[in-house]
Amino acid sequence: MGRIVQKFGGTSVGSVERIQNVAKRIIHEVDAGNEVVVVVSAMGKTTDELVKLATEISGNPSKREMDMLLTTGEQITIALLTMALHQEGYKAQSLTGWQAGIQTEDAFSNARILDIDSKRISDLLKDGHIVVVAGFQGLIPETKDIATLGRGGSDTTAVALAAALKADRCDIYTDVTGVYTTDPRVVNSARKLPSISYDEMLEMANLGAGVLHPRAVEFAKNYNITLEVRSSMSEERGTLVEEEVSMEQNLMVRGLAFEGNITKITVSSVPNEIHALAELFTILASNGINVDIIIQNVLNEEKTNISFSIESNSLSATQEVLAAHQAQLGFESISYEQGLAKVSIVGSGMISNPGVAAKMFKALSDQEIMIKMVSTSEIKVSTVVKQEDMIKSIETLHDVFELDARVPVQNT
Ligand code: ADP
Ligand code: ASP
Ligand code: MG
């Protein structure tokens, strides 16, 4: 007998029929003799609709109330799915995040899970129940407030529970059949990967591949939990996210990730002093502004320009913070460029292959695509391009790195 955590995303539980379909998939595992813990998201686009409702009331809603609101979505699904399991004659109980013992840090909207007291779940499992847990939420122990884990955070609930319960498997059911070389909804020739390493998946997720929440991958890596990402609508085997990639070792590039809505800020003529960078980025960080790629362009001995990229929706906050500290930082002016996107290639084989970045830049320049910023790590190269060039960049790179050219996955 095994212990399994199954997670079903929003589309997979988007209607009564789909909830009934999910119940059947759970029952399949239970009938095979497994203990099953299920984590679910809010139905369909419920979370987006709740966000919209809040913004109709307030341009700047309280983060506490926002989390109170958004966690209701998952609460609907756990109750309905549990009823569907009862309907099929199975013992099941739903638990909110706090009932499931999920404790988070004291932060709203993007809280990390710090600990899980899994006794209640273990007792229910021992008693023969299927346990259905609300994803994306936990409790701040000090204040007893409800916090959410960030958009897409139900994946993290599932993997964290799998770690706490020492589960044998963690299956992430979604609306695509696995992790692809890039988003299959954007690039038709995207190819499903049989497996991907934790490090590559973590880069992909952090660089915009929404198929898994980055913290879920972190948990999986830290606790060595193999994940299978697969479809709730088909029997096709999915993609294994694991330590060692079992096939296709040493690929130079395993996948592409991308995200739009990026703005580049340039702070001009900053005094070229030892503390300049530290001071600027400390001020931005302490005001909660997330900075991504940074470029320093020294003009002369006295002055330097500093550019950095941010999410476009933090533009006005960034401008306000910089303006408020202009005298302290001593820069001359700020300029910005909106409508940018980040396109990244990811692959652990890059470490030992010089020339991957060069090949990427050449491919983009052959298409007359202007690269505005670059950042690299051992296993990725990211470029910032105009948003209007994003799709063309992805398609070009997908071709150039021959990501669709390998043997298709054999379904089992
Ligand atoms: P869920 O609600 O099940 O959590 P998500 O919408 O969060 O589903 O994630 C699945 C979506 O991720 C897919 O529909 C797909 O558009 C997107 N996606 C982005 N990059 C990839 C990728 N590399 N492979 C597969 N799906 C991807
Ligand atoms: N319902 C939440 C969201 O839409 C959490 C999740 O689906 O993982 O972001
Ligand atoms: Mg998701």
Image (cartoon, helix red, strand yellow):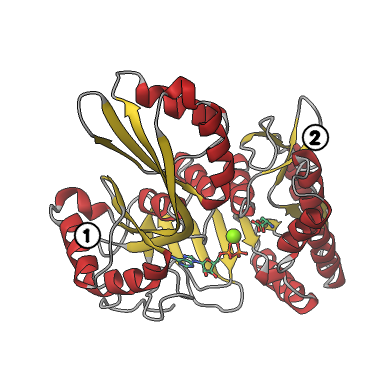
Q: Which residue is mark 1?
A: 252
Q: Mark 1 and mark 2: span between their CA atoms?
A: 46 Å
Q: Residue shown at 50%/77% (left/top)?
A: 236
Q: Residue shown at 61%/72% (left/top)?
A: 232
Q: Residue furthest left?
A: 354
Pinpoint residue 18: horizontal percent, then vertical percent.
72, 76
Q: Residue shown at 37%/78% (left/top)?
A: 410
Query: In the shown orientation, is residue 389 left or right of residue 109?
Result: left
As rendered, which of 156 and 164 lies closer to the eye?
A: 156
The earlier-in-sequence mark between 1 and 2 is 2
User: Circle 1 — which element?
Assistant: loop
The answer to whether 136 is drawn above or below residue 230 in the figure is: above
The answer, for residue 274, to whether it is visible in the render is yes
The answer to whether the beta carbon of the residue marked 2 is less than 8 Å from any atom of ligand 2 is no
| Residue type, label 2 | Asp
User: How many residues crowd mark 1 within 10 Å: few (<14), some (14–19), many (20+)?
Assistant: many
Residue 367 sits in quarter: bottom left
Numbered mark located on residue 399 in the image: none
User: How many residues crowd mark 2 within 10 Å: few (<14), some (14–19), many (20+)?
Assistant: some
Q: Quadrant of ligand 3?
A: bottom right
Q: Quadrant of the C terminus?
A: bottom left
Residue 89 sits in quarter: bottom right
Query: In the shown orientation, is residue 6 left or right of residue 76?
Result: left
As rendered, which of 103 and 109 lies closer to the eye?
A: 109
Q: Residue shown at 62%/50% (left/top)?
A: 153
User: Circle 2 — which element?
Assistant: strand
| Residue type, label 1 | Met
Numbered mark located on residue 145 in the image: 2
Pinpoint residue 260: horizontal percent, then vertical percent.
47, 60
